[in-house]
C-alpha cells in the first residue's frame, strides 16, 4: 500500500493536526478516567465498604478504562490516517474478513465476558456467598469477568464460565428461612405434641443469645403433613444469611427431641415389612430369583 503524500507545503499542517489529535485523545482519556474514578468511589461507598466492594469497583473500573483506551486509540488512529491521505480500503476489507472469522470463534468468550460484567455490575453474588448454580450448591471462592470459581461441600472445585450460569440462587442475601418437620407417631395425642413444640419455641424465643441471631420468633405452624404412619409438626425459623439459620435449626431439633422425650411423646418410627416364605413353599413372584 503506497501512501499518497500531499504537497510539501502542507506537511507542517499535517504534523500540527496529528499532534493535536494525539493531545485531544490524551486529554479525553484523562477526563474519562477521572470520571471513572469518581464512579469507583461511589460504588465503594454504595456497598459495605469492605474488601469485596473495593474488588468489585476495581474490576469494573479496569473494564471501563480498557474500553475507553481502545475506543480513543481507534478514533485517533483513524483521524491520523485520514489526515495522511492513505487509502486503507484494502486493509479494511482484510480486517473485516479476519473479524468475521474471529467473531465466530469468540462468540462463547464474548458471551462469558458480557455475562461477567453484568454479574459484577449488578452484584448478583460475591466471593464468600453460598449459591446454587445449575442445581449444585457451592461457595463462591473466586469471581472474574470470564468465569467464577465455586467449591461444593465435598471440597470439589468448579470453574464455571459466566455465560453458562443461567439461574443462580443466592442463599447469602437478605434472609434465610428453614422448616423443621418433627415426625410424631400417629397414635400420640396431637394437642400434647403441639403444646410441647410450642413450649420449645417459646423457650428458644426467650433465650437472649438466640433472640439476637434470629429475625423472627420461632413459629409452630401446626400439622404440615399426615400419612398412615406419622404426622409432621412443622416449626419455622428465620434468620440472617449465613450459618445462623442452619445452627438454629439444629438447636431446635435438639431441644424438641429432649422435650418430647420428657413429655412422653413418641416420634414416628419407620416401619419395615419383611416377607419370609414358609419352608417348602414357593417364593413370591416379586422375590423369585431367575436362573438361567
Image (tube, rainbow, N blue to C red):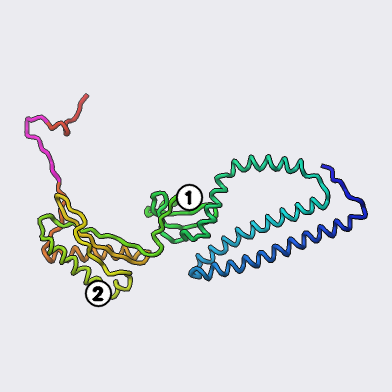
Q: Which mark is residue 12?
A: none
Is-magenta flag for residue 280?
yes
- Element on which disc 2 rests: helix
Q: Please state which of the two labelled residues, at mark 2 or mark 1, is closer to the viewer.
A: 2
Pick the quarter of the image with the C terminus. top left
Q: Relative to 278, is 60 above or below?
A: below
Range covered by the magenta-colored residues: 272-282
Residue at 86% over, 46% down: 4
Residue at 44% over, 61% down: 128
Mark-to-mark CA distance, 2 and 1: 44 Å
Is-magenta flag for residue 19?
no
Residue 219 occupies quadrant? bottom left
Camera-nearest residue between 120 and 242: 120
- Element on which disc 1 rests: strand
Furthest residue in direction top, as rendered: 292
Left or right: 240 as drawn, with respect to 274: right
**Residue assigned mark 1:** 160
Residue 55, horizontal then vertical, whole percent? 54, 64
Residue 217 occupies quadrant? bottom left
Amino acid at each position: 500500500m503506497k501512501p499518497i503524500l500531499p504537497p510539501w507545503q502542507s506537511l507542517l499542517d499535517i504534523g500540527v493536526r496529528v499532534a493535536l489529535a494525539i493531545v485531544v485523545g490524551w486529554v479525553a482519556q484523562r477526563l474519562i478516567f477521572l470520571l471513572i474514578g469518581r464512579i469507583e468511589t461511589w460504588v465503594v461507598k454504595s456497598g459495605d465498604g469492605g474488601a469485596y466492594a473495593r474488588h468489585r469497583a476495581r474490576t469494573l473500573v479496569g473494564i471501563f478504562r480498557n474500553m475507553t483506551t481502545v475506543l480513543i486509540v481507534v478514533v485517533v488512529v483513524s483521524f491520523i490516517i485520514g489526515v495522511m491521505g492513505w487509502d486503507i480500503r484494502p486493509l479494511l476489507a482484510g480486517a473485516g474478513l479476519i473479524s468475521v472469522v474471529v467473531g465466530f470463534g469468540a462468540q462463547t468468550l464474548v458471551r462469558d465476558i458480557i455475562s461477567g460484567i453484568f454479574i459484577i455490575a449488578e452484584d448478583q453474588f460475591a466471593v464468600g456467598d453460598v449459591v446454587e448454580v445449575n442445581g449444585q450448591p457451592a461457595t463462591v471462592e473466586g469471581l472474574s469477568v470470564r468465569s467464577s470459581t465455586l467449591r461444593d461441600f465435598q471440597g470439589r472445585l468448579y470453574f464455571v464460565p459466566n455465560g453458562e450460569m443461567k439461574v443462580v440462587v443466592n442463599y447469602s442475601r437478605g434472609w434465610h428461612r428453614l422448616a423443621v418437620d418433627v415426625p410424631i407417631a400417629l397414635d400420640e395425642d396431637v394437642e400434647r405434641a403441639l403444646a410441647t413444640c410450642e413450649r420449645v419455641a417459646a423457650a428458644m424465643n426467650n433465650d437472649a443469645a438466640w433472640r439476637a441471631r434470629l429475625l423472627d420468633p420461632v413459629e409452630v405452624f401446626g400439622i404440615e403433613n399426615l400419612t398412615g404412619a406419622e404426622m409432621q409438626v412443622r416449626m419455622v425459623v428465620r434468620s440472617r444469611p449465613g450459618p445462623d439459620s442452619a445452627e438454629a435449626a439444629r438447636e431446635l431439633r435438639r431441644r424438641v427431641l429432649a422435650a418430647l422425650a420428657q413429655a412422653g411423646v413418641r416420634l414416628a418410627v419407620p416401619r419395615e415389612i419383611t416377607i419370609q416364605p414358609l419352608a417348602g413353599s414357593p417364593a413370591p413372584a416379586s422375590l423369585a430369583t431367575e436362573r438361567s
